[in-house]
Amino acid sequence: MNELDLNTLLGAEDDEGSSRRRTRASGKRSGRRRRRRRNRGGFVAPLLAFVVLAGIIGGGGYYGYLWLSDALVPDDYSGQGTGEVVIEIKQGQSASEVAQELERQGVVASARAFTNAVGNANKSASLQPGEYKMRKKMSAASAVALLVPENMLLARVTLEEGLRLSVALSKLAEETGKPVKEFTAAAKDTEDLDLPSYAKGKLEGYAFPATYEFQPKTTPKEMLGTMVKRFNQTADQMDLEGGAKSLGHTPHEIVVIASIVQAEAGRREDMAKIARVIYNRLDRKPPMKLQMDSTTMYALNKFRTKATFAETKTKHPYNTYYVNGLPPGAITNPGDHAIEAALNPAKGSWLYFVATNPKSNITEFATTDAEFQQLEAKLRANGG
């Protein structure tokens, strides 16, 4: 092979090798370009999906708003509602439990609306146990506004000072709508009424007169227990036991004296003097009968202010024309003024008193029998 042929051959090889190298290089560059194109395609796809999703959300934004509104703003009625329904909040119930009951009975549209309204009004801790008269389909805010103590269903009963127990029980029955026989039975079964030991199991004199508010489900026994509790509070405040001891009497005797004072007095300012007359008669030597018409009327279950001569002869432990000393129990339920008078009698030597003017309830006092007769004459002159 000559030189030319060798160069030609070498040149051919060089060209072929170079061609192969260019082809491989070109293949590498082409691969990189293809990979770059694939990478660009991989980025574009999620971008395109995002744009499409954004378009969907943007196009359906109104419906998304409605969905969120429904989730965040619960169903609620508007206005004050109609009809009537009684709702009971039980002891220990939470606001959410009350809300569920209101929704169940159709008072509010949703429990969530009520709890939101309670929270907005800052009243979640002020829902008081009791029964409330409400309406159907009320706005949650209106429902919250009605659940206040002022709107609680209560039976208000005012028991005046000096009522006999039988009269007080009848009035309780009338005002609460419960059978009087239930009150009578509860008054006899006094074991659970928390009476003081010196009451000797008798309720007369210890059913304290006051104005009470009872919920519809309060039982007669619970009502009487509340009245006894009120008496016990007054007795503690006045130190009834200590005061009785200083006067040389038992606490029960003080209650009996207070009940007579309450029955006999026409005015508060006369109570301490009437109490003094009772003590003077009890302490007199020899003993002097109390001769109080109020005790005789109690014995006979009558309600007049003056006993007849025949009635004063009635043989009965409560007839103080017949027995010496105090009757065995109270004849009324005295208030705090009468109890205070019994514990703090006025100073004086009176042995008699007469309500000389029935119209004005003025009571006058006397020490001697002759003075007493003059007061009796004055009473007759005034039509008594």
Image (cartoon, rainbow, N blue to C red):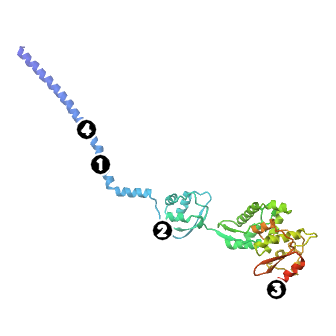
Sort mark 1 into few (<14), some (14-19) or many (20+) by Cα contacts within 10 Å.
Answer: few
Sort mark 4 into few (<14), some (14-19) or many (20+) by Cα contacts within 10 Å.
Answer: few
Q: Which mark is residue 317?
A: none
Gap in Å between the C-alphas at discs 2 and 3?
68 Å
- In the rendered view of the protein, which quadrant contains the N terminus? top left
4 or 1: mark nearer the eye: 1
Sort mark 3 into few (<14), some (14-19) or many (20+) by Cα contacts within 10 Å.
Answer: few
Asked if residue 236 is positioned above or below residue 176 in the image, the reply reads above
Q: Which mark is residue 38?
A: 4
Asked if residue 48 is positioned above or below residue 319 in the image, the reply reads above
Q: Amino acid at mark 4?
A: Arg
Instruction: Identify the element where label 4 is drawn.
Output: helix
**Sequence-wise, which precedes: disc 4 or disc 1?**
4
Instruction: Identify the element where label 2 is drawn.
Output: loop
Q: Amino acid at mark 3?
A: Ala
Which residue is pictured at 87% across the width and 79% down the height?
371
3 or 4: mark nearer the eye: 3
- Contact (CB < 8 A) between labels 3 and 1? no
3 or 1: mark nearer the eye: 3
Instruction: Identify the element where label 3 is drawn.
Output: helix
Gap in Å between the C-alphas at discs 1 and 2?
46 Å
**Sequence-wise, which precedes: disc 3 or disc 4?**
4
Residue holding disc 2: 79
Gap in Å between the C-alphas at discs 4 and 1?
20 Å
Residue 261 appears in the figure: yes
Residue holding disc 1: 51
Residue 197 appears in the figure: no
Asked if residue 373 is positioned above or below residue 153 in the image, the reply reads below
Q: Position of residue 312 (x, y in %)?
A: 88, 78
Residue holding disc 3: 381
Q: Nearer the viewer, residue 234 or 323?
A: 234
Sort mark 2 into few (<14), some (14-19) or many (20+) by Cα contacts within 10 Å.
Answer: few
